[in-house]
Amino acid sequence: MIPSSAPGGTFALYTLISRHARVSLIPNQQVEDELVSKYNRDKPPATLQRAEWMKELLETNKTVKISLFLITMLATAMVISDAILTPAISVLSAVDGLKEKASFLTTDEIVWITVGILVVLFAIQRFGTDRVGYLFAPIILLWLLLIAGVGLYNLIKYDTGALRAFNMKYIIDYFRRNKKKGWVSLGGILLCFTGTEALFADLGYFSIKSIQLSFGFGLVPSVLLAYIGQAAYLRVHPEDVANTFYRSTPISLFWPTFILALAASIIGSQAMISCAFATISHSQTLGCFPRVKILHTSRQYSGQLYIPEVNYLLCLGACLVTIGFRTTVIIGEAHGICVVLVMIVTTLLLTIVMLLVWKISIWWIVAFFVVFMSSESIYLSAILYRFAHGAYVPVAMSAFLMVVMVVWHYVHVKKYNFELEHSVPRDKVKELLERRDIQRVPGIGLFYTELVQGIPPVFRHLIEKIPSIHSVLIFVSMKHLPIPSVDMSERFLFRQVDREDYKVFQCVARYGYRDPFEEAKDFVDKLVEHLQYYIRDVNLYGVGCEPMMKQSSSYRSSRAESFSSHEKTKVKAVYAEEMLTPAESFSEHARQASGKSKHFAQFQGDKMNIVEMLKIQQEQQAVLEEMSKGVVYIFGESEVVARPHSSLIKKIAVNYLYSFLRKNSRNGEKMLSIPRRQILKVGISYEI
């Protein structure tokens, strides 16, 4: 079975870099998010110094940080554009074979048959690939066996001398004989390995051994035999160069070949479309794409996604490209530039990974960069030579997508910085809570904010306009980390805002890029459950017990010290309020009490007395009682505008383009599937 794609290869590399260096443009890093870099003490000092230099460069040089983000966005836009071109060229090339048996079909009729198949292909995306995915592997296996067998047949029948093409001397003679025409022809060779950008998006779902076996003994031999067989056929029939595949297939195998070719093209298109869905989903988690509705089509496979709005746009784009170009030749030239640009960006990012993460010898890094970048640059120059013949289409689509993503992310970062700069100080929060005219509302209020540190300014705006507060108020921030998944025991990070009369907390709900959001009710149940653990732990470890507070956070502190010693960075102390509180911690203390030393038992007897336990139970019960009275979800509806003296470009980007995107994208409550009757929106305007 072929599962849905994980985020694209370039985004996977970008997130890998993000785990080892703070390259994010959004200042929402926390001490608890730091991942200890896997520095190997056995590595030579020179490689460690280069890694530290690269880390410092990425974190301190804003130009480098922005450039890294932009090239990642470029490759992402190219992958999404490829999801339009791949279905168009794959299905059109398969359907074009009908002319061999039905020569009366015109080009227009072939195009409209292709459009019909494309509409059906995109229409079934909403059902996901879970139900029909088990047919994918057998079809692809039959397809590879078929093209390998036909290639071997053609090689033996027509000209075994085609095997001499493995001699490097012939490619040198080819360029020497054809000169400029030979260089330009390199653009057509790119079609031999298109699809790798989608393939690398699927690698995270398979083991290394399965990839090596399928590549080495399945894909590569079959494709090589197919191309060698076609070359042998063309040695005898050079006039069939325009439609070599079907002309070189034995007549008796035409219909099985046609059916399998159509099925394989649909499967390949499905993989590319799924890759686009996953890439957009990942872009959205990083604040780089407008909010869209993301549906999970499989309960068994978490990576299978469907985005209705994007699916409609991809379908429209594929149909327009098919109708506009009408032939696979022009679409192929457009397809090639997507592939080679993604390859170049991947080479750049992988070089950074070699320096920063893998820390291998500089000579291997130089050899890798020189070999791959030089060859990819030659292919890029060849495809750009025929830019006006179709290569401009993906460039134009990618430029449009880049503008959308860059503008959205730019405003997102500016808005976050504005809220951070104007966040409500802790003493001001206490002053607001102690106002005489403030009313207590029963129930739990979940105040959603993007800030992971500090109270958003919209809270002060709410209290000033409507002086009321819920009995339990929780500021909730949904945060995505550059890792695949966050364990449920480390999902919620709490901090208590007021420790006296008001139950006001901050909560950071942390997700990996493969973690789906829960339904509203399930999310509240889990949040309140972990809040109970936090109330227990903060009373046990944080009240008149400074030694235990330090002990309970020793794990995080040791990680921070390890990180600091290797990275030469200063990490703030971690307090009990900031520590993660796994559910089993209390039961472990209870079970281990009898097995600890007399000193620890005496400590348990002094601190964990009946009064203390009753206090914890009362606080926990009070939260549960308020939960039973109802939950209200509070959202800040912020209108973002450019400052009056901003540049014209900034005003257009913020006041018009971003405003249009925000009005036509999903709201936060729709993304989280929150019932409308439980929503309270607070309007506020920001000038950035």
Image (cartoon, rainbow, N blue to C red):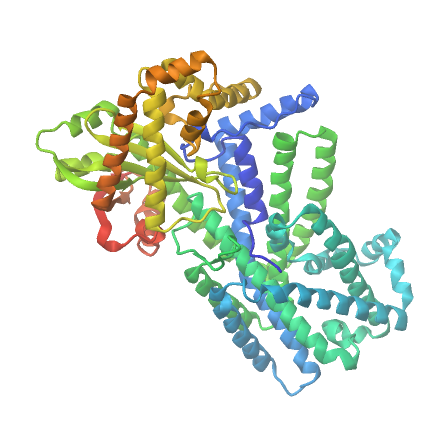
- Is there any visible trace of residue 31 in the rendered image? no
- In the displayed structure image, the side of residue 239 where residue 310 appears, left or right: left
Q: Residue furthest front?
A: 594
Q: Position of residue 71 (x, y in %)?
A: 54, 43
Instruction: Place residue 89 in its image quadrant.
Output: bottom right
Side (left or right) of 198 relative to 642: right
Q: Given the current orientation, which residue lies at the most extreme bottom position? A: 104
Please indicate whether residue 264 sits to the left or right of residue 125 in the image: right
Q: Looking at this view, name the residue that lies furthest to the top.
A: 599
Q: Position of residue 444 (x, y in %)?
A: 23, 41
- Residue sitting at 40 percent across and 33 percent down? 28
Pinpoint residue 20: horizontal percent, then vertical percent.
55, 31
In depth, the one of 299 and 539 nearer the eye is: 539
Residue 457, x across and y down, in percent: 24, 34
Where does the N terminus fall, quadrant-wise? bottom right
Q: Which residue is more in the foreground, 86 or 186?
A: 86
Q: Is residue 256 visible?
A: yes
Q: Nearer the viewer, residue 638 or 523?
A: 523
Q: Is residue 313 above or below residue 553?
A: below
Location of the C terminus by quadrant is top left
Q: Is residue 15 above or below residue 57?
A: below
Q: Is residue 59 above or below residue 379?
A: above
Residue at coordinates 46% horizontally, 51% vertically from top-left? 281
Going by the image, does 98 lie left or right of 394? right
- Please tell me in which quadrant of the rendered image residue 164 appears: bottom right
What is the tally of numbered marks visible in this picture?
0
